[in-house]
Image: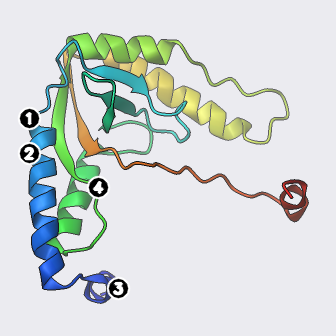
């Protein structure tokens, strides 16, 4: 019931829906047609993997970031990402990152594995977020094991939202005062 109320209160005017539908159709077509297997496609890990998901940032042949590839990993289920986008569009909510199903092949899987091998989440003794870093390391190792045993990997290919702002917790009042 709460979702329906939210949808009813945030649904845009019908003239906006026509413009949005055109944008989403064009963006979905672009994402579907983009060849992740092309050797000119650039892949990198998204921002040092802030969360627990293993996400690839995707760049086009000109080096422009165009999206992210999110396979099932950590706390991310790629099919849920796709379903959330489709539900958002169905409910005509005004803010949805276009998302399509996509598969990466062995060459990109090898590149993904090399990127993951280049990092390690080892918490320092007494570190505040030691448990979170240990969990990230377990997810990283699990993804490496998975990559070693597959020839392709399905995921959600999402449009890049620019600028992407990653918020950090403010911490305590004392920490906040230090920032002044």
| Whether residue 71 can be seen here | no
SS at circle 1:
helix
Residue 2 has which mark?
3
Nearer to the camera, 147 or 29 = 29
Disc 4 crowd rating (10 Å Cα; few below 14, some 14-19, many 20+) is many
SS at circle 2:
helix
Disc 1 crowd rating (10 Å Cα; few below 14, some 14-19, many 20+) is few
Q: Are marks 3 and 1 in contact (CB under 8 Å)?
A: no
Position of residue 109 in the picture relative to residue 162 (left or right): left
Position of residue 87 in the picture relative to residue 116 (left or right): left
Disc 3 crowd rating (10 Å Cα; few below 14, some 14-19, many 20+) is few
Please provide percent x and percent y for residue 25. Answer: 9, 55
Residue 29 has which mark?
2
Please provide percent x and percent y for residue 174. Answer: 91, 60
Q: Are marks 3 and 4 in contact (CB under 8 Å)?
A: no
Residue designated by label 4: 97
Q: CA distance from mark 2 to mark 1?
A: 6 Å
What residue is at 19 percent from the left and 75 percent from the top?
Answer: 91
Q: Are marks 2 and 1 in contact (CB under 8 Å)?
A: yes
Residue designated by label 1: 33
Nearer the N terminus, badge 1 or badge 4? 1
What residue is at 19 percent from the left and 74 percent from the top?
Answer: 92
Which quarter of the figure has residue 122? top right
């Amino acid at each position: 019931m709460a979702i329906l109320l939210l949808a009813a209160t945030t649904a845009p005017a019908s003239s906006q829906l026509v413009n949005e539908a055109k944008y989403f159709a064009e963006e979905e077509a672009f994402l579907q047609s983009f060849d992740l297997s092309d050797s000119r496609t650039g892949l990198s890990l998204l921002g040092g993997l802030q969360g627990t998901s293993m996400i690839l940032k995707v760049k086009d042949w000109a080096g422009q970031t165009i999206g992210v590839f999110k396979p099932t990993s950590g706390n991310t289920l790629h099919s849920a990402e796709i379903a959330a986008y489709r539900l958002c569009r169905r409910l005509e909510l005004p803010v949805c990152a276009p998302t399509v199903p996509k598969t990466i092949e062995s060459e990109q899987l090898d590149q993904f594995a090399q990127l993951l091998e280049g990092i390690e989440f080892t918490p320092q003794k007494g570190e505040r977020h030691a448990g979170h870093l240990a969990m990230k390391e377990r997810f990283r190792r699990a993804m490496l094991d998975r990559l070693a045993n597959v020839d392709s990997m399905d995921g959600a290919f999402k449009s890049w939202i620019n600028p992407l702002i990653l918020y950090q917790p403010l911490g305590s009042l004392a920490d906040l005062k230090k920032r002044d």
